[in-house]
Image (tube, grey):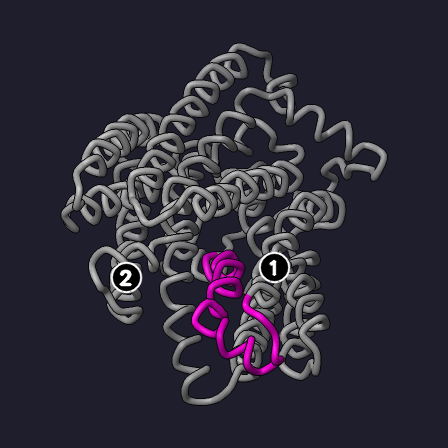
């Protein structure tokens, strides 16, 4: 993660540090996952039911989904650096409010504000990479960002569990405020503005028109669907994994935490492997092969789930492979969604991220509804997500070919 990127954008020679961009992007899932081990403690702290405490998570997800498209517009209108700095300032402030709030209702509102602030990191980082990279270099850089985002939800529950058992619920949010402040200071020192001076600045009245351009773009939609559905393949399992492993294999919460940590590590391995393969054979081949393998793995998981009882390795091995393939696919999909929209990279990044989040998040809801103790419905949901991801990939291919046939001045906006 010590790499820096030589710019390929005309007139732009700045080199943003990938480590800083990775941490800025990873803080978004980190902020969501750090409270997972503390749900019972939060319920006790505010004398509330677990059903009410769930809104602490839902508010954060809703904040990411609603803020990211708007953050993308702000990045294109006012620049990447300014939006990142203000976003993380909001995140630090909201984290401090979370730490001192006396009521659960105010905590829920502050969690929404937390997500609004940290959404700037995910959106602006992708826009910065689009400013400074092209083609396979962009997909390679996205691989490092994806690796950081994959590592964040591994580290967050570990830190969250330690803080809530050794300190208090308030310590969770004090830690996020401290981390956010450190990242903010690093941005002040190391983050340049990469939006080229004189670049067209979108007006507010043009935002809807830009969305219309993106939503009519097969390349944008296909890559966004690919990103959302491949993430949904493991979000399906995440929603009920702890309950299933406890019910079926008498596995403790600590043991499942180790399992999930290994799964997330597989994602990081996939993202890192994808970066290396992209340099050798190109992003299109890496993503295409991974999509095909993910569909085959999803079908295999569904077949294995028809056995009763399901051997634990018949669950773990396919899921681990899917995490690896998700790690190789995600960077290419993230890059592909903004590749043909350099003149509105921030807007495209924000809308793609938000749409992908809604798609993947919906699989956690459906999984919770269909799960009744058997793994077969979950396996079917995983296989469905992989199949829909493949459909998105086919749409992206057709859109990419169409864009490649257009004149240069048209290709920028499709």
Q: Is residue 141 visible in this depiction of the protein?
A: no
Sequence-first disc among 1 and 2: 1
* Magenta highlight range: 22-50
Marks 1,2: beta carbons within 8 A: no
Q: Quadrant of the C terminus?
A: top right
Disc marking residue 246: 2
x 58%, y 36%: residue:
10
User: Percent position (x, y) of residue 162?
Assistant: 39, 81
400 relative position to 315: left or right = right
Q: Is residue 351 visible in this depiction of the protein?
A: yes
x 43%, y 51%: residue:
145
x 64%, y 17%: residue:
410
x 47%, y 19%: residue:
395
Circle 1 residue? 60
Taking depth in this image into account, of 413 and 234 the one nearest to the observer is: 234
Snapshot quadrant of residue 135: top left
Snapshot quadrant of residue 127: top right
User: Percent position (x, y) of residue 325?
Assistant: 29, 39
Q: Is residue 131 above or below residue 409?
A: below
Q: Quadrant of the N terminus?
A: bottom left
Q: Is residue 90 above or below residue 236?
A: below
């Amino acid at each position: 993660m010590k790499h820096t990127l030589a710019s390929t954008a005309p007139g732009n020679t700045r080199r943003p540090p990938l480590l800083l961009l990775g941490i800025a992007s990873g803080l978004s899932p980190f902020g969501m996952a750090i409270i997972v081990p503390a749900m019972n403690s939060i319920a006790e702290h505010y004398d509330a039911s677990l059903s009410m405490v769930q809104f602490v998570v839902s508010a954060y997800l809703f904040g990411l989904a609603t803020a990211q498209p708007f953050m993308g517009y702000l990045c294109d209108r006012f620049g990447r650096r300014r939006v990142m700095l203000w976003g993380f300032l909001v995140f630090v402030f909201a984290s401090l409010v979370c730490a001192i709030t006396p009521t659960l209702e105010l905590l829920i509102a502050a969690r929404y504000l937390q997500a609004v602030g940290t959404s700037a990191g995910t959106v602006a980082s992708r826009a910065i990479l689009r400013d400074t990279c092209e083609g396979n270099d962009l997909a390679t850089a996205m691989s490092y960002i994806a690796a950081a985002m994959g590592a964040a939800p591994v580290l967050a529950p570990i830190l969250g569990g330690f803080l809530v058992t050794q300190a208090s619920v308030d310590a969770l949010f004090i830690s996020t405020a401290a981390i956010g402040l450190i990242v903010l200071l690093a941005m002040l020192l190391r983050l340049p503005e990469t939006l080229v001076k004189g670049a067209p600045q979108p007006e507010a009245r043009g935002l809807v028109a830009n969305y219309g351009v993106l939503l009519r773009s097969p390349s944008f939609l296909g890559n966004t669907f690919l990103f959302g559905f491949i993430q949904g393949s493991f979000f399906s399992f995440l929603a009920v994994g702890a309950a299933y492993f406890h019910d079926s294999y008498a596995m403790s919460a600590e043991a499942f935490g180790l399992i999930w940590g290994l799964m997330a590590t597989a994602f990081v391995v996939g993202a890192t492997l994808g970066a290396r393969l992209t340099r050798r054979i190109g992003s299109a081949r890496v993503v295409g092969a991974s999509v095909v393998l993910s569909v085959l793995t999803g079908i295999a998981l569904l077949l294995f789930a028809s056995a009763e009882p399901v051997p634990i390795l018949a669950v773990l091995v396919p899921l681990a492979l899917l995490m690896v393939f998700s790690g190789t696919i995600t960077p290419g999909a993230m890059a592909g969604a903004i590749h043909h929209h350099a003149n509105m990279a921030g807007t495209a990044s924000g809308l793609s991220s938000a749409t992908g989040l809604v798609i993947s998040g919906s699989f956690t809801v459906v999984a919770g509804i269909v799960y009744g103790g058997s793994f077969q419905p979950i396996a079917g949901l995983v296989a469905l997500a992989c199949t829909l991801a493949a459909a998105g990939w086919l749409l992206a291919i057709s859109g990419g070919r169409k864009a490649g046939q257009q004149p240069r001045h048209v290709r920028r906006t499709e």
